[in-house]
Image (tube, helix red, strand yellow):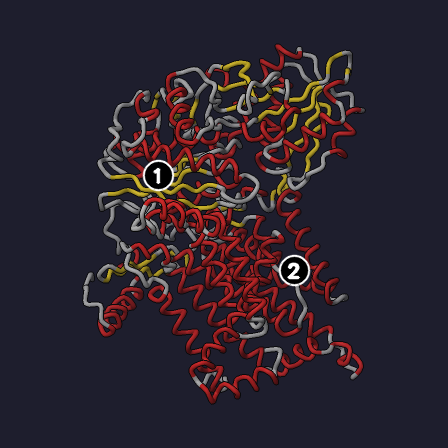
Amino acid sequence: MSKSNFTRRGVLKTSAIAGAGVALPTIFTASSAAAYTNEPTGSTVTLGFNVPQTGPYADEGNDELLAQQLAVEHLNGKGDGGCLNTFTSKALKGNGILGKKVEFVTGDTQTKSDAARASAKSMIEKDGAIMINGGSSSGVAVAVQGLCQEAGIVFMAGLTHSNDTTGKDRKANGFRHFFNAYMSAAALAPVLAKEFGTDRKTYHLTADYTWGWTQEESIKAATEAMGWETVNAVKTPLAATDFSSYIAPVLNSGADVLVLNHYGGNMINSLTNAVQFGLLDKQVNGKDFQIVVPLYSELMAAGAGENIKGVLGSMNYNWQLDNAGSKAFVKSFGEKYGKPPSNSAQTCYAQVLLYADACERAGTFNPCGVGDALEGFEFDGLGNGPTLYRADDHQCFKDVLVVRGAQNPTNQYDTLEIVEKTPVEQVTYPPDHPMFGGKDASLGECNPGA
Amino acid sequence: MFGLNKKDGLLFLVVIAITLLAPFLLNPFPENSGMAQFNAGYPDLLQRFAIYGIFAIGFNILFGLTGYLSFGHAAFLGVGSYAAVWMFKLFTYNVVPAIAFAMIVAAIFSVLIGYISLRRSGIYFAILTLAFAQMSFALAYSVLSNPKFNLTNGETGLQVYSNDPQMFHRDGLPNLPHIFGLSVRASYELELGGWSFTFNVGYYLCALIMLIAFYFAIRLFRSPFGMMLRAIKSNNTRMTYTGLNAKPYALAAFVISGMYAGLAGGLLAAMDPLAGAERMFWTASGEVVLMTILGGAGTLIGPVLGAGLIKYMENIVSKINDNVLHQWFAFLPDGMEDFMVTIIHPFVGKGWNLTLGMIFVLVVIFLPGGLVEGGQRIARLFTGKKARAAEKSSQSTPAE
């Protein structure tokens, strides 16, 4: 039906035929000849970068976008090649993916599930994106992952820390490189025991939404297992900006450790309030009062300024990591943008390269082929050290960093110092772990769409 | 025709033609041209045009006719979405019961909220509705999504899982919302030379429902009931002094308008089976006010145009990034190219809100009647004699 007589009559005729086609559902659904959704047919392949460009996580989103652009540059053989030189898989040649030049489109998630799905859909339906990457919130990640599963597109998650993303909401077409709340807890617990002893009383302040709950659940389980006692856990509304009224009761509760299950602006405000109340100078039960922020990010650390000195937390990646992949990435990123990459930038960069590499190894862009290539894939050289993409739940397993707010920062980027690299064995859990949906959780079938 | 007078009938025919041909009209540029960036004829956006058109038409029945400014209309949209997704989860992926249920639930909600809010008017009414909407948002976002009683699934949004009961679902039916077996995602692609047009089941479903909603709105505008609502807008006190209780009329308008919002919410869920709490946030309520004012409050077609403009900005302008800009100005010398990109950069991509804001300010200052007034002025330029007649009619019926 690809007539090119674009006259008025021609259009009318063809639309009449199209109308007839609409009436016949069998023709209708089987009209596409492509083997899978958005099969690239020309000399280029389009990736969709869906990041928050407005809203509370806009800073993280823009950092992700910088890293994604850098990754595309490296894939197309421009720049210094970055991690392509250190990546253990040598399938990528710097000539695009499977010989096709990599192009990209961007969208704004606004950190809202709805807007994120709309922009992902427009990238899929209008721009023909074959893969969606990015995002800075677990709610958004779960929503977009579901959409990609339905549409038959691969989703390479960006920053998402909730257990649910690869837990009860896991999907065959979705892949997460970032770590999760359970891993944070498992990595932090031994360090906490070492630093603060095994006889502590904790008080949780938790952002009242999905991510906050899974984080609180994970930290509680891990700390209680080593002998700590949970005095109280209070949910705070996500929109709260002043946490004084939540901090005051902490002083009289008999707790001597405060865990802030907050992220972004929430964390900056609650930590600032806690420090202003002088919690860190107090002595309770004969011990120094301590604050723990389980999930750190560079941008939050910068926002909280002085207040984070000495506060413990965990990270997926830090630019100070001393391995070949990390050095290559920091060098590329720094030379191009004049600052070190953040946690979220690194995970997006790695995800784009991992996707491209999986396509090369599979020899196809078909989501099922790409999925097979990623499942059980072991690699190194992307900055995190040796990593495994587990087949059962599409979660990456690698060392987790425990970090502390730097006591004497030497420059504005030196806000966090690495306390310990928790080895991967310690943070590994079975795929049917109760916090991850238990026995019911399943990836389902991979969906190539069309 | 259709029981409408000649002018309305013509307007309705034009709207029918535009909606049915939208996949053509909104894809005016060949796929590989640089202008393809501005094409809006892809299913997701077309569906949004129709759905938010319904939402704005409904809002206009309340705001345009009675003058009551509801600042919490998104609550009904959200409630409709949740209701529809629960239908999907419990019974069937067929969209018909889901949409019907969405409207019923939204109607119940709007009776409750309307009964209380309509005790006040003006700014107090707006604040009351806003308060109720924010309450609904907070309920959906955290209170009703705790692990023990999970009605809304909080931040993640309510979704359909493979282990949901779905009593009337059977094998062979699409695993996505469908209309009697025909998936709403099913599309037909038509390649014509360099052009590519997509005809999508979901869009035509939304378009059909929007046409029905639009027809119902015209009939309502022209009915004695509509006249009564206009009377409330022009002088509520005088109505009361003539011994007429205006409140049931206002409540009826509020509920009808709430049901329109519920219908829109149900359709949103039917096109994409996920309901998020952000749909109820106050910015979403503000958006429909913007749509209506931008297009022309109190006019029939205005809100639909306003909805279209805002959704176009949100989905098309927000996707123009620096890369695209560099491509556009690649023909200029290097320095000039960078200069142009720097100038335009703040207004596109993440700056789409800024551009929208400027358009809104310009429209409110220069075209107080919205886009519809702009259209009328342009029409007047071409037809000298009809001009005065149009002006006269627009003066005699200010509520239009």
**Chain bearing mark 1:** A
**What residue type is disc 2 on?**
Phe
**What residue type is disc 1 on?**
Cys
Q: Secondary structure under badge 1? A: loop
**Chain bearing mark 2:** B
Give how far across and how far down residue A370 sits, in percent: 31, 34
In the foreground, A95 or A289: A95
In the foreground, A340 or B144: A340
Camera sees residue A435:
yes
Q: Residue visible at 57% across and 52% down?
A: B279
Tell me the number on the disc at residue B71.
Answer: 2
Q: Residue visible at 42% across and 57% down?
A: B45
Tell me the number on the disc at residue A446.
Answer: 1
**Foreground: disc 1 or disc 2:** 2
Give how far across and how far down residue B130 sits, in percent: 68, 56
Quadrant of the image for the C terminus of chain B? bottom right
Give how far across and how far down residue A87 sits, in percent: 32, 22
